[in-house]
Each structure stands twice: as C-alpha cells, then as structure tokens.
Amino acid sequence: AAEAILGQNLNGDDFDVVLQFSNQKWFTNINSGAPGIDEFDLWTVALHELMHGLFYVGNWRKDGNGASLSGGLVGSFDQYVAIGDENYACAVSGLLGSDKSQPSDEALRALTSGALSFLRATDVGNIFSSLYAPSEFLDLSSVYHIDPTDQGTSQDLLMAPSIPAGSTLRSIG
C-alpha cells in the first residue's frame, strides 16, 4: 500500500508479504465442499494472513507497564485505532507524547479497555469496526483483529483473532 501511495519501490527485490503455514490438516478444495471439523481451510487462513500483510498490521507493542509504537512510527492502520464508539472517539496514538516510542500506561489501558475501535472519517461517512482488545495485551494479536463478540461490527469474521477448524470465511468484507 505504501508503495502505491508513494509511487516507488520501498523494499527492492524483497517480497511485500510472505505467508508461511504450519503443518496442519488443511482443506485445499476451493471449488466445492467444506472442511471437516478437524480441518483448517487453507484459503481462509491465507486470506486472513494476507489481510494482515496488506493492512491489519501496525506498530503497537506492550513495553513494560505501558504501550508504545515500535520505532515511534504510527502505521497506516495505527492512525485509525481509537477508544470510544462511532459517535465519539479519541485516537489512541494521541495518548502518547511527542516521542511515540516512549511507553504510556494510559495507552496500554486504552488498548486493553474492550472499547477499542477502528474509526476513519471519509467523504461518504465513517468506517467503524470494534477491534479485539482483550484485558491482557497480546503483541501481534490485540488491536489487529476485529472483535468477534461485537455482532454489530461485522457479519464477516475473516479478521477475528482465531479461525476455528471446520470454518470457511472467504469474503474480505
């Protein structure tokens, strides 16, 4: 996405996204059928991980008793992470000082509040989704998934924190 916006190659010959899969019992038939209750749908898992590579990724990390943005960088997803709801919200990155790499206990409380959202104002209306914010911050899992318990957020759980065996979720929204 950054390369498309800037119109230049930012990583040379390196891949933009690399997907690696563990040795699971995979369902690989994309044309028909459904995975068994003990199989994982390879297409679903690949789409989920590709979405992380394209957008559901950022720099929030737990750092001691606080949270910070790794390298002090506010990622393209991170800038829309807010606490609140679609009517009133505060950008969580705004809870950090000018040096965004310095941990903030207030930011960690926001990221584990259960009231975390993705909120972006557009010309045609707001884009709002509740985000996964468990009471214990989990690097690379908290923030970068939708909240599967908020039925009003999305019928599509492709970006939920986990995909159970036997599930087929092949729509990106």
Image (tube, rainbow, N blue to C red):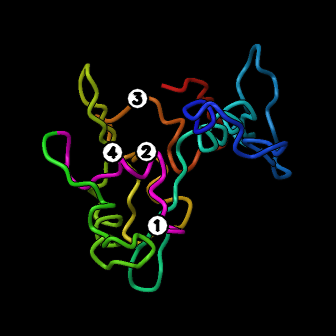
Q: Nearer the viewer, mark 2 or mark 1?
A: 1
Give the magenta-colored segment's residue range.
Answer: 70-86
> Which residue appears at 82% of the width and 45% of the height?
14
Label pair 2/4, CB-CB below 8 angstroms:
yes
Where residue 41 sits in the image (x, y, percent)?
72, 34
Tell me the residue that label 3 is attached to.
Answer: 155
The amino acid at mark 1 is Leu
Tell me the residue that label 1 is attached to.
Answer: 69
* Quadrant into which the N terminus falls: top right
Of 67 and 42, nearer the camera is 67
Q: Secondary structure at mark 4?
A: strand
Tell me the residue that label 2 is attached to.
Answer: 146
Q: CA distance from mark 3 to mark 4?
A: 12 Å
The amino acid at mark 3 is Gln
Q: Nearer the viewer, mark 3 or mark 4?
A: 4
Mark nearer the N terminus (2 vs 1): 1
Q: CA distance from mark 2 to mark 3?
A: 11 Å
Where residue 28 sits in the image (x, y, percent)?
82, 28
Tell me the residue that label 4 is attached to.
Answer: 130
Quarter where residue 15 is shown = top right
* Dot 3 alpha-carbon crowd within 10 angstroms: few under 14, some 14 to 19, many 20 or more: few
Q: Nearer the viewer, mark 2 or mark 3?
A: 2
Quarter where residue 91 is shown = bottom left
- In the rendered image, residue 73 lying in the magenta stretch gets the answer yes
In the displayed structure, 165 sits above or below 114; it is: above
